[in-house]
Image: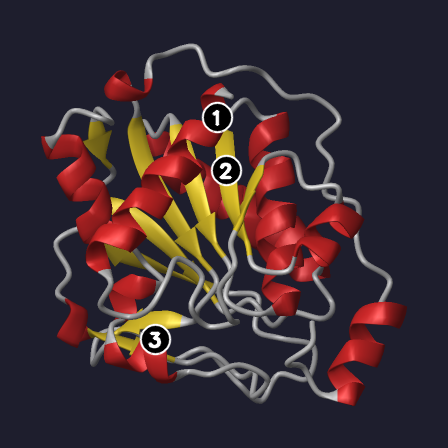
């Protein structure tokens, strides 16, 4: 939290964080090498020239989502995240540093996981009032990923409020027998949320799995994140 502004620190201190602890949770019933994996990232990415940008003018946050295909190239991804409290340069330089599709594809080739979903989910994680997220968005994206026969979902938040956004998605998924694991950049928030399963990272906000082009380091972090479901 040391790098955050005074106002952001106060917001984190006094905000009424949701309880993201699932009421029920089931263990993974497959080996990782048999699992189909999808990503939910809160970095606000869209498919350039094909999808509407997230609406940065919605006061309490845009709770909509975008479907990102696995065969996307990085230069066809564009960021629309409204927060000005983190360094956006890493996302702009390499969108896959917050949406690690190539990393999963490589891990599937190495047979560490079974396969990669054809569809992934992009959220704009700066959602202060998550009512619509909970009532509408989360059930919809759950159905999309279940239709994709996904066994395991990894979550990639990029700034403080993103932890709650992905935590609420994880809670619903876990309660409906879809196994999850999330990156945590600020463990103080993740602990407040009572998130079920997470991997703490030592990086700055905006760099959840490492520097933009440190691919091997990033892939190893994704591998560790996936391994959390069997620990």
Kindly tell me whether residue 148 is visible in this rendering: no
Label 2 residue SS: strand
Label 1 residue SS: helix
Distance from the alpha carbon under mark 1 to that under mark 2:
7 Å
Q: Is residue 111 left or right of residue 145?
A: left
Residue for badge 2: 181
**At x 74% / y 36%, what residue is drawn?**
21
Residue 155: x and y, percent?
47, 48
Mark 3 surroundings within 10 Å by alpha-carbon count, few (fewer than 14), some (14 through 19), many (20 or more): many
Distance from the alpha carbon under mark 2 to that under mark 3:
21 Å
Q: Is residue 159 above or below residue 102?
A: below
Residue for badge 3: 91
Q: Earlier in the sequence, mark 1 or mark 3?
A: 3
**At x 68% / y 41%, what residue is drawn?**
195
Q: Are marks 1 and 2 in contact (CB under 8 Å)?
A: yes
Which quadrant holds the N terminus?
bottom right
Say which of 160 and 224 sits in front.
224
Residue 97: x and y, percent?
31, 64
Distance from the alpha carbon under mark 1 to that under mark 3:
26 Å
Q: Residue furthest top?
A: 29
Residue for badge 1: 229
Say which of 93 and 149 sits in front.
93
**At x 28% / y 58%, what residue is drawn?**
68
**At x 26% / y 63%, what residue is drawn?**
96
Say which of 50 and 125 sits in front.
125
Residue 180: x and y, percent?
50, 34
- State how the image is colored: secondary structure
Label 3 residue SS: helix
């Amino acid at each position: 939290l040391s790098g955050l502004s005074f106002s952001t620190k106060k917001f984190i201190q006094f905000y009424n964080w949701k309880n993201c602890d699932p009421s029920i949770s089931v263990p993974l019933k497959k080996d990782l090498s048999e699992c189909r994996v999808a990503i939910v990232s809160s970095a606000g990415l869209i498919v350039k020239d094909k999808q509407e940008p997230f609406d940065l003018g919605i006061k309490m946050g845009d709770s909509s989502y975008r479907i990102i295909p696995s065969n996307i190239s990085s230069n066809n991804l564009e960021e629309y995240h409204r927060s000005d409290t983190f360094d956006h340069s890493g996302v702009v330089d390499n969108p896959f540093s917050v949406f690690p599709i190539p990393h999963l594809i490589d891990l599937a080739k190495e047979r560490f996981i079974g396969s990669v979903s054809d569809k992934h989910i992009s959220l704009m994680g700066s959602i202060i009032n998550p009512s619509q997220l909970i009532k509408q968005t989360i059930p919809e994206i759950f159905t999309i990923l279940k239709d994709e026969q996904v066994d395991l979902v990894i979550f990639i938040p990029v700034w403080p409020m993103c932890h709650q956004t992905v935590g609420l998605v994880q809670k619903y998924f876990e309660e409906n027998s879809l196994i999850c694991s999330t990156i945590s950049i600020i463990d103080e928030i993740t602990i407040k949320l009572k998130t079920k399963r997470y991997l703490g990272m030592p990086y700055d906000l905006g760099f959840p799995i490492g520097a933009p082009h440190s691919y091997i380091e990033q892939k190893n972090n994704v591998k560790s994140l996936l391994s959390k479901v069997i620990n």
